[in-house]
Image (cartoon, helix red, strand yellow):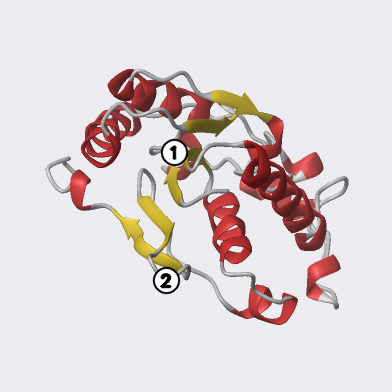
Amino acid sequence: MIKNLYLVRHGEAEHLIGKGLTGGWTDSSLTKKGRTQAHETGKSILNFLGKIDVGFYCSDLCRANDSAEIIGSYIDKKPVALIELREQNNGNAANLSTEEAQKISSPISEPIMDWIHYPNAESWRSFNNRVFKFMNVIEQESMETVLIVSHRRIILAIIHWWLEFSEDYIKKVSFDIEPSSITYLRINKWGEKTISKLNDIAHLTDIKL
């Protein structure tokens, strides 16, 4: 059973800095700043965890995988890269510019959980089902402390899973998740699921904006 769950978003990536690319399954690389952020995050994670044995997973997209490799170098752990931890699949919009993607986008439809933004993309429902299924498996199979390096929407979905949100809350409740932020979820001494840290970027304050 997972008792301590650390969630880290990848560092700044090319598609986030005005390159005009969509995110999702676009396999954009870390920027120089993003790599620096990952190093600072690794130092912070080392302060939290030391070098104890943890379940360590990441998305197999390079911006998350590279961030995880850098973080792992500080805690002497090798991440397990998995397709299940990729960002929400944006289908045919992957690797397109935002302008090109707009041309193939579908208007919002109800129910919103079943809306598919682009051809061959995941709906919000299918995305959450993927993430929830993965988390249910590792909750049974993994260690008490788990570290996951992934993407914004993945982290949102894991928080929703952790808090056991109903579909109605999933549609209405979101959280800010910045690049290289740390979110820490834990079970306290009363057995309650808590959010101890959310979108913590204090370790990045010395990095030039």
| Mark 1 residue crowding within 10 angstroms, few (<14) / some (14–19) / many (20+) | many
Is residue 91 depicted above or below 157 in this figure? Answer: above
| Mark 2 residue crowding within 10 angstroms, few (<14) / some (14–19) / many (20+) | few
Q: Residue at x 22, y 32 (%)?
A: 43
Q: Which mark is residue 10?
A: 1
Mark 2 and mark 1 residues within 8 Å of each other at the beta carbon = no
Question: Is residue 58 or residue 52 the one in the foreground?
Answer: 52
Q: Residue at x 35, y 27 (%)?
A: 71
143 horizontally vs 195: left or right:
right
Q: Earlier in the sequence, mark 2 or mark 1?
A: 1
- The answer to which image quadrant residue 116 occupies is bottom right
In percent of width and height, residue 46 lies at 25, 33
Q: Which mark is residue 190?
A: 2
Say how many tags the image has.
Answer: 2
Amino acid type at mark 2: Trp
Amino acid type at mark 1: His
Is residue 55 depicted above or below 23 in this figure? Answer: above
Q: Residue furthest front?
A: 190
SS of the residue under disc 1: loop
Which mark is nearer the camera, 2 or 1? 2
Q: Residue at x 38, y 65 (%)?
A: 189
Inter-mark Cα distance, 2 to 1:
32 Å
Q: Is residue 60 visible?
A: no
114 horizontally vs 5: left or right:
right
In percent of width and height, residue 99 lies at 65, 49
